[in-house]
Structure formats: structure tokens, C-alpha cells
Amino acid sequence: MSQSPASLLRAEGVGVSYRLAGKTLPVLEDVSISIFAGERVAIVGPSGAGKSTLLHVLGGLQNPTGGRVFIQEQDVYRMPSATRTAMRAKRIGFVFQSYHLLPELDVLENVMLPAMAVGRLNSEVRASGLRLLKAVGLEERWNHTPLELSGGEQQRVALARSLMNDPEILFADEPTGSLDSKTGALVLRYLFELTASRSRTLVIVTHNAEVAAACMRTIRMKDGRVED
């Protein structure tokens, strides 16, 4: 009998709640999911369903109040904080709806930031940054500042930055939410093509049914729980 493949990313009974005015406000309740290497997974659901919170917990950004998260059987929230930060920098990439580019840096410097965060800054890092900018069609804008770019161009820079350390998992939280449909479609094309060409895992939060349909699998959420 063949053995089922091990998951790359797994959540077991994850919960997140906050105390507000003396009451407990649950945001996630008993969420258990598995995601496998090379998958393209959409997380969908109405506003307030807990999608972004789940993404942050899966990506090591927000401690759950219950449950556990594993990346290749490493328990993310039982690591020392410094170890988790280093793991996140090397193995995980993020693309958010807001681009989070530093306006005082040029485009290439913004792309190289993840490498600089793990102590890498040399000619090869620069060359890698330029290759990523070429991959998203912005190699000629490398020395511009973010404020000189359109919203779609800034999001493509953010995408290039997220791939700087060649992460195993890329998390995208409504990456086209601030863009018009034509520009958003272009950003998604780059997002899908770049992760697929590198056989990387993509987990994307979206309200867009067409984006979800382009993924291999959809996780539906409602009221902080996974529906199916």
C-alpha cells in the first residue's frame, strides 16, 4: 500500500481569540488543514471569516491562542522567537494588498531587502534582484523609487521581493485588491507563473471567484471555521 505524501504545511486545531471589553472574541476556531508542496491553494470566504488571520498564523506572523502549526514537521510556535524569524525569512515569502515598499529605497534595494535581512549583500544578490525584476517586467525601473511607479508596478516589485530568498511557500493576501481588473490580472499572471516555474507552494486569500478557480484547491471559511 502506497504511503500518503507528507504535508509541507499543516495546522492542527488552530484557534485565535481576543479579549475585548471583558468578553472573548473568537476569530479562528479549531482550524485544521494540510497543504502540500507545489500546491496552489485559495482561501475564500466572506469578510470577517478569518482568512487573513489564518494566513498570518500559517506564515509564522501571529501566535495562535490554541492549536499548532507545522512546516515540514517543525512546530512553528514552539521554536524560539529568533529561530522562527530566521525560518520565516528563508522559507516563506509574503505579498500583501498594501505593497509595504520603503519609499526611501529604490526598487532594486526594496527587492533585495529579504536577502539583506539574513545577512546577504553581494554582487550575486544584486544580480538575483535584477533577474527577478526582469521576470516581472520591471528591469528598466530598478533605480526608480516606489513613488515613481504605478500601483500595479509597485505590487510587481513586492512580488519580486517576496521571491528574493527563493522561499518554499508564498503567502498572498488579496494581492490584487487595490488594483483595477486589467492590472490585477497581470499581477496574478506573474504570481502564478513565477511560483509554478519554481515548483513553489502558493496560498492565496481572495474574494475573486476566478482567482480561486485558477487554483488547484479551495479552502472555504465562514465565521472563523473551515467549511470544507
Image: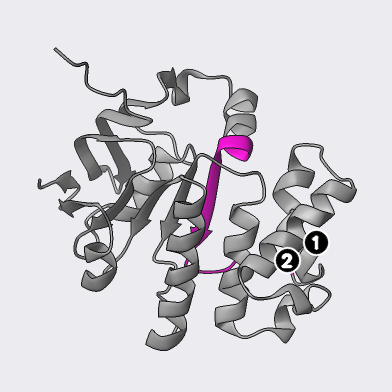
Residue 92 location in percent, x, y?
53, 41
Give the residue at the far front of this rendering: 1
Q: Quadrant of residue 160?
A: bottom right
Find residue 102 and name its label. 2
Separation of residues labelled 2 and 1 (CA atoms): 9 Å
Q: Amino acid at mark 1?
A: Glu
Q: In the image, is residue 61 above or below residue 193?
A: above
Find residue 109 and name its label. 1
Q: In the image, is residue 219 above or below residue 154?
A: above
Q: Residue at x 52, y 52 (%)?
A: 94
Q: Is residue 45 left or right of residue 166?
A: left
Q: Is residue 47 visible?
A: no
Nearer to me, 39 or 58: 39
Q: Quadrant of residue 155?
A: bottom right
Find numbered disc 2 in the image and state the secondary structure of the residue it sits on.
loop
Binning the other alpha carbons within 10 Å of mark 1 as few (below 14), some (14 to 19) or many (20 upward) gives some
Q: Quadrant of residue 81?
A: top right
Q: Amino acid at mark 2?
A: Leu
Between disc 2 and disc 1, whose residue precedes?
2
Q: Residue at x 42, y 23 (%)?
A: 72
Find numbered disc 1 in the image and state the secondary structure of the residue it sits on.
helix
**How many numbered discs, if any?**
2
Residue 79 location in percent, x, y?
53, 19
Q: What is the quadrant of the C terminus in the image?
A: top left
Q: Tags 2 and 1 in contact by the CB under 8 Å rule?
A: yes
Nearer to me, 13 or 202: 202
Binning the other alpha carbons within 10 Å of mark 2 as few (below 14), some (14 to 19) or many (20 upward) gives some
Give the residue at the far right of this rendering: 123
Find residue 157 and name its label. none
For the record, the magenta segment spans: 88-102
